[in-house]
Amino acid sequence: MKKKTKKESNETTRASVTREMAKPRMAKSAREGEKNIAAARIAAGKP
């Protein structure tokens, strides 16, 4: 039996794409590295 997937409305998809396109272009590995650095910064700031 197939699972039914939820479909996004066209406006939601368009808004998502617009937000993504507003970001600077970056390689996937660079995005992952940036995420790791941010997580380390947050963890280091906690007492």
Image (cartoon, rainbow, N blue to C red):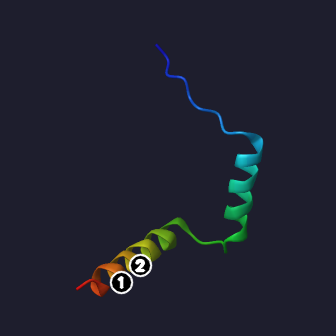
Tag on residue 19? none
Q: Is residue 45 left or right of residue 32?
A: left
- Bin the neighbour count of mark 1 within 10 Å (Cα to Cα): few under 14, some 14-19, many 20 and up: few
What residue is drawn where x is 22% and y is 86%?
47
Rendering coords of residue 1 (x, y %): 46, 13
**Front-most of residues 24 and 5:** 5
Tag on residue 38? 2
CB atoms of marks 2 and 1 within 8 Å = yes
**Front-most of residues 11 and 34:** 11
- Bin the neighbour count of mark 2 within 10 Å (Cα to Cα): few under 14, some 14-19, many 20 and up: few
Residue named by callout 1 = 41
Rendering coords of residue 18 (x, y %): 74, 60
Rendering coords of residue 14 (x, y %): 76, 51
Whole-number angstrom distance, CA of label 2 to CA of label 1 = 5 Å
Position of 24 relative to 28 (above/below): below
What residue is drawn where x is 54% and y is 23%?
4
Rendering coords of residue 2 (x, y %): 50, 17
Q: Secondary structure at mark 2?
A: helix
Q: Is residue 27 left or right of residue 34?
A: right
Q: Amino acid at mark 2?
A: Ala
Q: Secondary structure at mark 1?
A: helix
